[in-house]
Image (spheres, rainbow, N blue to C red):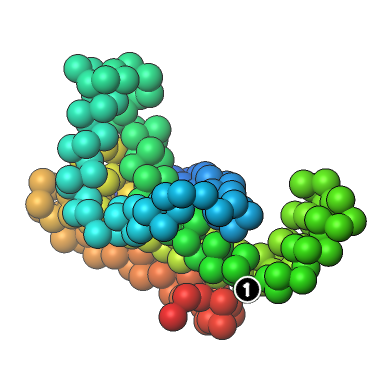
Amino acid sequence: DGAGAFDAYVLRVLQFTLLQAGLSTLLSLILGLALARALARQDFPGRTLVLRLLNLPLALPAIVVIIGIVGVYGSSGWLGGAVALYGLQGILLAHVFFNAPLAARLLLGELERIPAESWKLAAQLQFRDIDVFRLVEWPQLRAALPGVALLIFLLCAASFAVVLTLGGGPRATTLEVAIYQSLRADFDPQRAAALAMVQLALCAALALLAQRFGELMPG
């Protein structure tokens, strides 16, 4: 019936919201961690410039980034056809562009707190890379990762312009965009209210997690 279809729609939107936010967070953390480790352990000409460039995605309007992604990966772009731009892959591409540098900066800050003596001792003992990560870096990163992951997840779950532009249709939409579409395109206040309640519940759950890891979140 109508209620069942409505419930299925809300569930599908919620599932996609969590899926895209989870995958975006995972990919951003993997790339951000790799970049943070490289910057923490290497001093090279241009390092300061690289650090400044990591702040650039945060200053760019989302629509500018989206236009740039379409220009590169669109059908007539430099890498046209390399990825399916409209849908989950396009959303992930944009979210990683925004959030991998953010993860790198936050995790680099943690790595820079490791005492210089720890790095010297690791070099003297000829630690392998995996041992350096396990014994030197991981103890410092372990406490910060949940907070960084939650921050990125929140940003991706509440993303609007990226999903609206690159989502590609009803199968790739999030709660934020579905609320907008319910009011703007369908003019269905009841559905919009139901979606808003689901989003409120999700945000409340994430807020409880944020409180749990409050001391880990960047100030």
* Relative side of 170 to 153, left or right: left
Amino acid type for the residue under numbered disc 1: Arg
* Relative side of 83 to 141, left or right: left
Estimate the x, y position of residue 196 in percent, counting from the top left.
29, 65
On screen, residue 215 above or below 102: below
Estimate the x, y position of residue 137 in percent, counting from the top left.
71, 61
Estimate the x, y position of residue 157 in percent, counting from the top left.
39, 57
Q: Residue at x 18, y 37 (%)?
A: 67
SS for callout 1: loop
On screen, residue 167 above or below 136: above
Locate residue 102: give its quadrant: bottom left
Locate residue 166: give its quadrant: top left
* Relative side of 22 to 176, left or right: right
* Relative side of 96 to 41, left or right: left
Q: Residue at x 48, y 70 (%)?
A: 206
Query: What is the quadrant of the N terminus in the image?
Result: top left
Residue closer to the observer: 177 or 111? 111
Q: Residue at x 42, y 50 (%)?
A: 46
Query: What is the quadrant of the C terminus in the image?
Result: bottom left
Residue closer to the observer: 15 or 28? 28
On screen, residue 109 above or below 152: below
Residue closer to the observer: 85 or 196? 85
Residue under circle 1?
113
Which residue is most to the right?
125
User: Is residue 11 visible to the viewer in this orientation of the structure?
Assistant: no
